[in-house]
Amino acid sequence: REGIVMRRLILYVVAMVALTLLAVTTTACGGGSKATASSTPAASTAMVTTLAGQAGSKGSADGNGAAARFDNPLGIACDAAGNLYVADDINNTFRKVTPAGQVTTLAGKAGATGGADGMGAAARFAGPFGVACDAAGNLYVTESDGDTIRKITPARKVTTLAGKAGA
């Protein structure tokens, strides 16, 4: 019985942390309440909605809202305009989601893996994991299987900044 109570307590704490992070992320990306997570309970400042994709429907389709498909999205970042950038792990791609829910593939090609630099779909990734963006619109991305740190420019040019693919 103690084990069940402890698991429930852990799940509750994890859920509260996740809701707090969601409230902070929503606020940082220009949505939701402008109240801070420290001054207002997360449950009252955040509403969970699906911006793009459909639960239980894996794939690699670009499109608007529920028509878009992802396969194991891992990392996410947002820019000042409220665009989200997603590391789509199984598809080996990096995707952009506008505030309206329009999804486009910025770099990589679904189903193709590797470590090649290049423009847009010509670039190859191996296990895209993390993503961050700077004020100029450049993305800095990591790969769990490629062991590299890469840069994606607003023009969709991918270059390796550190590491060597597969080494």
Image: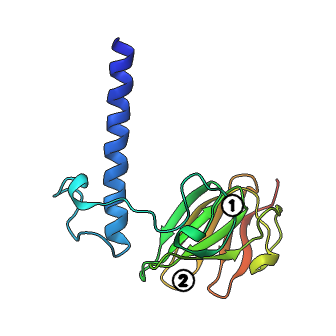
Judge left or right: residue 144 versus residue 9: right
Front residue of 97/108: it is 97
Front residue of 66/11: it is 66
Q: Position of residue 26 (x, y in %)?
A: 35, 66
Q: Position of residue 46 (x, y in %)?
A: 29, 60
> For the residue labelled by badge 2, is the local secondary structure a helix, a strand or a loop?
loop
Q: Hey, which residue is sitting farthest top in the picture?
A: 1
Judge left or right: residue 130 versus residue 17: right
Q: Residue at x 69, y 83 (%)?
A: 156
Judge left or right: residue 47 versus residue 131: left
In the rendered image, the vertical position of residue 84 relative to residue 39, given as above or below: below
Q: Hey, which residue is sitting farthest bottom in the picture?
A: 155
The earlier-in-sequence mark between 1 and 2 is 1
Q: Nearer the viewer, mark 1 or mark 2?
A: 1
Q: Position of residue 38 (x, y in %)?
A: 20, 56
Q: Measure how far apart labels 1 and 2 are at the Cα level.
A: 26 Å
- Binning the other alpha carbons within 10 Å of mark 1 as few (below 14), some (14 to 19) or many (20 upward) gives some
* Picture quadrant of residue 128: bottom right
Tell me the quadrant of the picture where the N terminus can be found. Answer: top left
> For the residue labelled by badge 1, is the local secondary structure a helix, a strand or a loop?
loop
The residue at which mark 2 appears reads as 137
Q: Position of residue 56 (x, y in %)?
A: 58, 51
The residue at which mark 1 appears reads as 59
